[in-house]
Image (tube, grey):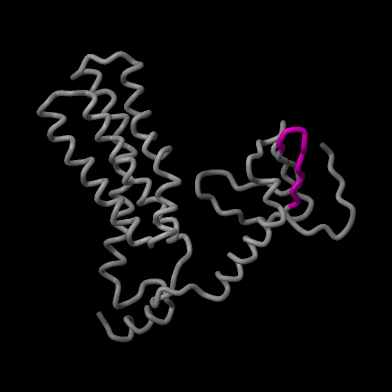
Amino acid sequence: MPKALLQEREIIGFIPAKSLLSFSLVTMLFLIWGIPNNMNDILIKQFMKSFELTRFQAGLIQSAFYMGYFFLAVPSGLIMKRYSYKVGLIIGLLLFAVGCFMFWPAALAGRYELFLFALFIIASGLTFLETGANIFNIGPKSDGTITDEETQVLLGTGKWINVNGGAIYSTRPWKIYGEGPTKSASGQFADQKEPFNWHDVRFTTKGDTLYVIALGLPDKALNIKA
């Protein structure tokens, strides 16, 4: 690889030249981690044939899997907060591996319950991995630090949540989600090309309280049609 290209990649900070191999491996891991989430539907059909399961028993496959997320989501975050993301990712990989290897004795024993437990262990590992992987939403530079611009965005978000968190946490959508002239981008992972403004509002509710969130700083009285 040309030396100039390596230097350029170090400068732009997107793919650190010295960490190109590790960056590629981590990127491939995201694909591998996502495969188990798409295997459950296949397992349901196969288990129904092999174990002559009822539909209720087959539904336990999804339940056993997502119970791992339910029980381990908060503990995984606490462990990473106390130790490090590296420790959390290693724990996740170990749990993932143990769950996968458990399919072998479960198949030898022919026990449906062992398969459910293996799926639970796999999902527990995925909980650690996906929680730790959230940090990749903030692109670090080659030395592991984030830019001043990203820091200011995170600090600004924290200040906003500190003031307006009551309108977010433990709330439910109102009878309509909101109103405003700007149309939201449709489709999964679609970018919002037209920016929202203070005429666009969103509604949440908690108990008898209705919250109105303007998606911009109003420069005059805000009229709400709803």
> What kind of secondary structure does the magenta stretch mostly adopt?
strand
With respect to residue 43, does 69 lie above or below? below
Residue 148 versus residue 99: which sits nearer the camera?
99
With respect to residue 120, does 49 lie above or below? above
Residue 154 on image: x %, y %? 58, 65
With respect to residue 49, does 148 lie above or below? below
Which image quadrant is residue 134 in? bottom left
Residue 36 on image: x %, y %? 30, 40
Relative horizontal placement of residue 101, taking residue 183 as reference (left or right)? left
Kindly identify the residue that appears in the image at 82 percent across and 57 percent down. Answer: 218
Q: Residue furthest left?
A: 108
- Is 81 part of what is drawn in magenta? no
Residue stretch rendered in magenta on the structure: 205-214
With respect to residue 159, does 41 lie above or below? above
Kindly identify the residue that appears in the image at 50 percent across and 49 percent down. Answer: 189
Kindly identify the residue that appears in the image at 43 percent across and 37 percent down. Answer: 70
Residue 116 on image: x %, y %? 27, 29
Relative horizontal placement of residue 49, taking residue 225 as reference (left or right)? left
